[in-house]
Amino acid sequence: MSLKEMLRFIIISAIFATPFICLYVAESMFFPFITGKNFAFRILVEAMLGAWVLLMFIDSTYRPRFSWILAAAGTFLTVMTVADFTGVNPFKSFWSNYERMEGLITLAHLFLYFIITASVLYSENMWKWFWRTSLGSSVIVSIYALTQLYGSSAIHQSSDRLDATFGNAVYLAVFGLFHAFLAMFLFFRDGKENTMRWMYPVIAALNVFVLYHTQTRGTLLGVLGGVLLALLLVALFDKEHPQWKKYAVGGVIGVFLLIGAFIVFKDSSFVQSSPALQRMASISLSDNTTKSRFMIWHMSWEGFKERPVLGWGQDNFLYVFAKFYDPNMWAQEPWFDRSHDVFFDWLIAGGALGLLSYLSMFGAALYYLWFGKRHRFTVIERSILTGMLAGYFVHNIFVFDNLTSYIFFFGFLAFLHTLNAEVPVVEKVIETKKKRKGDDEFEGGDFAIAGAIVVALTCVMIYYVNIRNINANTGLIASIRPEGVLVDGPNGQKKIAMMDILNQGLFGTTEGREQLAQLAVQTQDPRVPENIRKMFHDAAVGEFDKELSADPNNVRMRSFAATFYARFGEYDKALEQFLKAIELSPTRQSTRMDLAMMYNAVGDYAKAEEQAKIAYELAPEYTEAAVVYTTTLIYQNKLDLATEVMLPFRNSSAFYDSRIVNAYGNTKQFNKVIELINEKIAKGNGVGRDYFSLAASYVELGQKEQAIAAVEQAMSLDASLKDQGEQLIDQINGTPPPAPSSAN
């Protein structure tokens, strides 16, 4: 094997390995479904890059050739590079975090993957084998998903939405979308000479079946829209295959009939008994998910208007989410780091230039599909690939992207580039089959020096970009397990294992600091030695200071710090962080509510009421805000207003929330406590400990018999309360506790 052949073998092996990245789940890593796949992809691309640089040194055939797809992808990378380095947090924009593993570093690797793959897979036949390999990976993934469907394997994300090796049903759905369309493209592209082409529709059907059971509505709409568009294009423009044209017309009619039937029978038992169909039938403007999407998109639009040209930089949506927070988001998860719409994501990350350059890649792909002069696609093939892009486009309206869909998308762009480059690689390779003088004479000279430099740089890149971050990631997982939290330090003393990782300052540091704060709270158990508790507390405080010094506008971290300090009774520090978080995100209720509860704890009821009232008035239907506001009103003895605030929640459990009951008790409104608890019990919602609260109020009112009866009722409902209940009865009767026995 010549040196050139060896380099080609390395690159092609790495290229053909990429479809199987989807199978890798790094169990020993933090965010195992995300990090392992991304690190594997980066290492493969970096290995390809080193070999490709040397291959270009040997043979200019493998150098990049121009196409508008290359221009679009290059422009997109350039725009995002400028946007990331001029954005709010360039470090985060470059590296991202463990949960997402995106950022500029991933975009750069995707661009390299695109350009290397387009240069080395120089013939359509090689691309066919690559796509067949990708279909093979989809079959393996689908089989695993079927084991989840039929109960042999666990579903990771939810109880019934398949997620296979992705850990996220949405990621599996778009993976299936791509491969369903790809299989049908190859069915027509291979022609009748391929006796195994019947397998392609089977693989397509398998992917659609799995996609259906992911219950991902946006992707299902994408598939439906993509199929409809493909059929319409064939029906309108295919003049060479009249039979297929008739089938396409029938298919269009069939799709519309299917949609109409679904709308008519969406409330039928058949639809409602299917989780996927039921989710589709629930789509409406009043659906909670739909409403939340509109709110997030509105917030994204406001963020775009503030930085319209180059945006905020990648992975900086959290700053937009905080600054333009919609109070009506209270029913959703507390933090969003994406717009849940790829186009808004790029509008935020790169502004108008970022979004336009992203869309230009779709435009260039469609241009070469339909107007390229060098390809030989039939109308049917063009229509299928156009339908695939349309399906992906629709999918992207409702979610954010991920590595595996990025790999497929950039691989598809590389495929079109290969067939349409200005100086086609496929033709150039055929013309240069004859070996040139000097191709294998590389024992010394310039190539040996270049080779040594490239190999060294590749090793350095793989280590600094991947290996040290992999070590930090696995170390983080080990350091939060009970057996690995503490390690031996100098002089035989214990030290916090995580500190060695955090001190490296790598891109997972923020997530590590959040984990450290949680460990600090968990270790505040009286059974833990005081010096250990203090060590964790002080370490967490130090890391909060570092994080907020480096990223002062991080509302999420300030909120964590505030609740952490309040938990430890450091109210001055907590107040500082609460007020700064409110300044950065004034319409976010939860921060004001936490601050109100802290004011309650220190007895500053007037300030507690002030903050709770603002939070409540931002969205009066927010149950938690109403409960907190009511609690502060009770402490202020504004009982009529407290009753008025809770009146809309009269039939919910919130009306009897323990914080409200305790507030009445703490302000000696014992009759009100008895009234509320008896109402709760009458509705069948009482538990054992409610009777303890009832007993305490009876005692305060001097009604011992009723108190004892309440305690006995508590013990009858919950056997675990027996010992505590007997002690309470003794206390009510005035019986002193037994004296401890003396040791002989």
Image (spheres, rainbow, N blue to C red):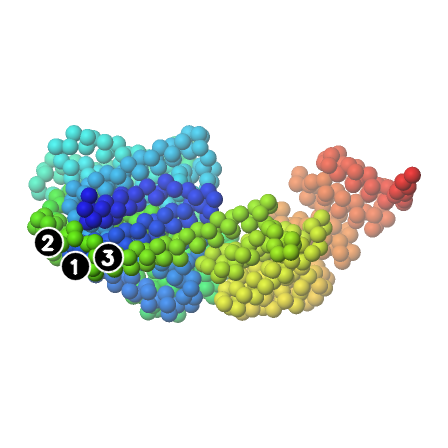
Other residues around mark 1 within 10 Å, as few (<14) / some (14–19) / many (≥20): some
Q: Which residue is mark 3?
A: 448
- Label 1 vs 3, first from the N-terminus: 1
Disc 2 residue type? Lys
Looking at the image, which is closer to me, 341 or 478?
478
Q: Which residue is mark 2?
A: 437
Q: Which residue is mark 1?
A: 66
Task: Give the image quarter of residue 450.
Answer: bottom left
Residue at coordinates 51% horizontally, 50% vertically from top-left? 475
Task: Give the image quarter of residue 166.
Answer: top left
Q: CA distance from mark 3 to mark 2?
A: 17 Å
Relative image position of residue 445 (x, y in whole percent): 20, 59
Disc 1 residue type? Phe
Task: Give the image quarter of residue 225.
Answer: top left
Residue at coordinates 23% horizontally, 33% vertically from top-left? 201
Q: CA distance from mark 1 to mark 3?
A: 29 Å
> Helix, strand, or loop for circle 2?
loop
